[in-house]
Amino acid sequence: MKKILFLLLIIANTISAQNADELFSSANDLYKNEKFEKAIELYKQIESKGLTSSELYYNLGNSYYKLNKVGPSIYYLEKALKINPLNEDAKNNLVFAKRLALDKIEELPKTVLQKFNINYLQQLSYNQWAIVVIVFSILGSLLFLLFYFADAPSIKRFYFVTSSLSFILLIISLLITFNQYSLSKNKKEAIVFAEKTEVRNAPTFNSEDVFTLHEGTKVLVLDDVDDWRKIEIADGKQGWIIAKEIKVLNDF
């Protein structure tokens, strides 16, 4: 009975993947014919099946961009990069999408370590860093076996050094993987979807307005109280915003 259920599950997943491929192809055709709203509907159907990918979010972001919908465009292009930070097309198109946003916020200066993390370490997602860990573990193991079975002292020395280096890189990449995973799970970023919204100094409607944000601005979510979210913007300013006026990027 278990084998039958397992086979049925495989068949169902295969059919679902085939349907998603057909939907993706149809949505791409609609996009090419400039039927962007209909293309979005099909892309959304794929998303609702849980079959998400960097390419799917990239196409969704482009579709919204063509409709001049700043918030959703930036949101989905950012999500494409969350899955695959090496998606150069998404990076380039995100630059164009951000030019449509009204808020021009100057970022706080970053330390050398923060710049190194952003410019180099975050070029791979934690899943991609995990693959690097596996590669170094396999490489280190193979080199150690070669060292063990080698006879000539010079060759043994070479394999010992290279295997040791591989294990050192394995430990470093493992630490980076855990760090990137922690950042991904604990750093909750969001995009403003409201055309215009007031950020307040407390989570109440009668509190004082501290600054104004517009559609497409990226914020960091620090806390939540009922239907309010405490946010921070790139220049360090903080305040409270109504939860429904932003959309969190990490929810995928």
Image: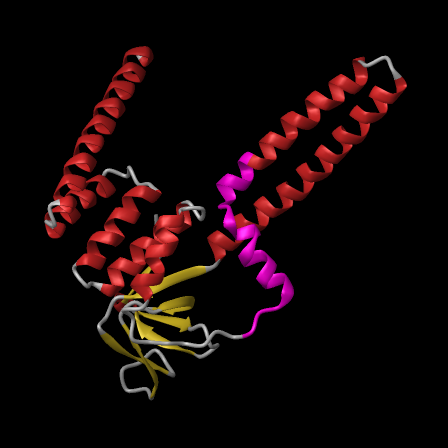
For residue 165, above or below residue 34 = above
Horizontal side, residue 114 vs residue 32: left or right: right
For residue 132, above or below residue 220 = above
Horizontal side, residue 159 vs residue 80: left or right: right
Q: Residue visible at 42% across and 66% down?
A: 220
Measured as percent of width and height from the top left, residue 247 is found at 30, 61
- For the question of whether residue 4 can be seen, the reply is yes
Q: Residue visible at 35% across and 51% down?
A: 90
Q: Residue visible at 81% across and 26% down?
A: 158
Quadrant in the rendering for residue 206: bottom left
Measured as percent of width and height from the top left, residue 19 is found at 18, 29
**Does the stretch in magenta take in 116?**
yes
Measured as percent of width and height from the top left, residue 223 is found at 42, 68
Q: Residue visible at 57% across and 44% down?
A: 177
Furthest residue toward right: 153
In this picture, which residue range is highlighted in magenta? Answer: 109-131
